[in-house]
Amino acid sequence: MRNYSPKALIVSLLLVCTALEADGLAQAKALQPDSLKGELGEVRVVASRRSSENIVPHQRLSGRRLEGLSAHSVADAVRYFSGIQIKDYGGVGGLKTVDMRSMGSHHMGVFYDGIQLGNAQNGQIDLGRFSMDNIEEISLYNGQKSSIFQSAKDYGASGTIYLRSRRPRFAHGQRRNVQATYRTGSFGLQNPSLLWEEKITDKVSAQMSTEYTYATGKYRFRYRKVFSDGTVAWDTTATRQNGDLHALRLEGGLYGLTEHGRWQGKVYYYRSERGIPGAIVNNVWKHSQRQWDKSLFAQGSVEHRFGENYELMVNAKVAYDKMRYLNPDTTLMYIDNTFRQKEAYLSVANHYNINKVWDAALSADWQWNSLDADMVNFVYPRRNTVMIAAASTATWHRLKLLGSLLATFVRDSRKLGVQSDESKAKSHTSKLTPALFLNVYPLSDKAFCLRAFYKRIFRMPTFNDLYYTDFGNINLKPEYTTQYDLGAVYQKTFRRGMLRQLEANADAYYNRVSNKIVAVPKGSGQYRWMTMNLGLVKILGTELSAQAQVEPVSDLLMALHLSYTWQLARDYSDPTDRDSYGGTYKGQIAYIPRHSGSATANIDYRSWGLNYSFIYVGERYHNSANIRANHEEPWYTHDLGLTKQFRFRGWGLSLALECNNLFDQQYDVVLNYPMPGRNWKITAKIKI
């Protein structure tokens, strides 16, 4: 990919932006002031922009299906998306990260209410931190989100997960909503939460959400190892230790409507202390590592429409994160390190309706990140990132097109010691990456659609990759992904008969990850490592999903959703590593199953609800050397839940009983990190 002059590209794009904005403002002034006035009341849609929702392949969890899942956190819920792999290190407090289509968790962008969650230190977003109590919808997009009216950051990932928190809604004449929830269950779980919504004026509302989670993290598991000749090495039952969690989440927001737009502001605080249970190896069943986390961010967003054709959106965020890791075990290595991250972010997005069939958008983002630590010889890195995205959509009869071009400019600086001159060490990176999406509707009713897309994007090495003491490599190059997708979707709603809704999706894809960042031994010793650009992964896969809603009799609604994924994700890093035993060339990469799938079923009858969910992950290997010693058995879980709703003079009570891992399967998602067996949860929820 050719590098373009940053100054020339920025000037060109800003000139286009200025022209679009001037034209939009001129049309806005030409309109009569009363032409857009109206009674807003509780209306939440403030702009009639044309939607390109179906252009980009996406999956969504919301409403009844989201409520029916046996999911304590966002990480538990996204397991039901096809093409997703979750790395779960066990228990309520275990780290949970997500990987889409085998491209690596660093290539997933996670957005909370439209603004990306960041971690410049290691690129990992722990989805276990985000509770389901305040989440209204979870969406997953391959490539990028369909709407072009978005920040430049939205274009900068291979795949994106969007978390949309609950926005206050009030019934006629109501000014307050209160929801109190209490969960208890296995592993010593105690989980109270409170949601409070207040209607301040007809156009301004406030929300406060708080939650506390405590769990001992102790659960019994069976551990069994069999040698390649079939001899049983050991078969024992033990209790998982040092997996306790104390976590507090506080969240507050203000939401407002204006005559031509809307705005919102949010403050989020999370604090936790947890034990790190560690891997079960060498007959060590208990570990003593601890981790403390603090996360605080404030973000806001303003959208305003000028006339009929031009919209402006401004997003801003400041964040502070602190993490302390303690390993008091001196038989390994005593570690007590504290890391502090700071982030500032500003985005301006412009959207313009050129005519009835053609839209254009231009976005510009600026982000600043810093990392401080108490380690010896730490270089205190700083990073300034500028992203400029130009995008356009066009609709012509039964054809839809979406194209985007993203320019990214990154400037890193580092220093030894907090008083040193930052100018001693600087690096610059500039890249230009395109994406193109296409939809065709062969039938006049548009129930059936054919779609395809191409996208090339990259991710910068994290601060740990580049600068971690005695591990990082300042000469690392960005890691690229190239995506190709061809798919079809059929979706139809029926007004008569038992069948209410039917949808089926099928996608075939090919991904290529180049310059993959991997850790390799440094020198002759196996105890010292460094990061290098050595990896090449080629991924071929298929995703299938179907869902249906049926109402066989009055008041009885049944919903079924099925998904299946087949993936061939091979390591092409080293063509010379072709040994008959232990070679990694063309081996399936670690923890990626060939076959995986899920099923969910919901039955609602008046005030009763029955929910069933099933997840299957096929056999896989914990190393690219696909030999028997690295083989991992398939695992699957069955979850069952029963709910009952009660109404008492304006307030409601909901009771739920869940049984997860119904058949008590013993399994590992990650080698040597045993997962819980059968476990229970009881939930009581009061709404006023």
Image (cartoon, rainbow, N blue to C red):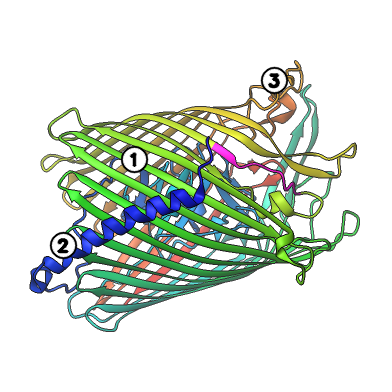
Q: CA distance from mark 2 to mark 1?
A: 26 Å
Q: Which residues are magenta?
A: 472-480
Q: In the shown orientation, is residue 574 left or right of residue 137?
A: right
Q: Nearer the viewer, mark 2 or mark 3?
A: 2
Give the residue type at disc 1: Gly
**Image coords of residue 354 (percent x, y):** 20, 49
Specify the label residue 575 is tagged with: 3
**Image coords of residue 494 (percent x, y):** 15, 40
Mark nearer the N terminus (1 vs 3):
1
Would you name the residue on which mark 1 appears?
A: 403
Give the residue type at disc 2: Gln
Circle 3 Cα neighbour tier, 10 Å, few/some/many (<14 / 14–19 / ≥20): few
Q: Nearer the viewer, residue 181 or 152?
A: 152
Q: Nearer the viewer, residue 349 or 506?
A: 349
- Name which quarter of the figure residue 240 lies in: bottom right
Would you name the residue on which mark 2 appears?
A: 27
Q: Are marks 2 and 3 in contact (CB under 8 Å)?
A: no
Q: Nearer the viewer, mark 2 or mark 1?
A: 2
Q: Is residue 269 above or below residue 670?
A: below
Give the residue type at disc 3: Pro
Q: Nearer the viewer, residue 302 or 5?
A: 5
Q: CA distance from mark 2 to mark 3?
A: 60 Å
Q: In the shown orientation, is residue 305 left or right of residue 301?
A: left
The secondary structure that dominates the magenta segment is loop
Is residue 207 among what the camera can see?
yes
Q: Is residue 87 above or below residue 340?
A: above
Label 1 residue SS: strand
- Residue 474 lies in the magenta-colored region: yes
Circle 1 Cα neighbour tier, 10 Å, few/some/many (<14 / 14–19 / ≥20): some
Mark nearer the N terminus (2 vs 3):
2
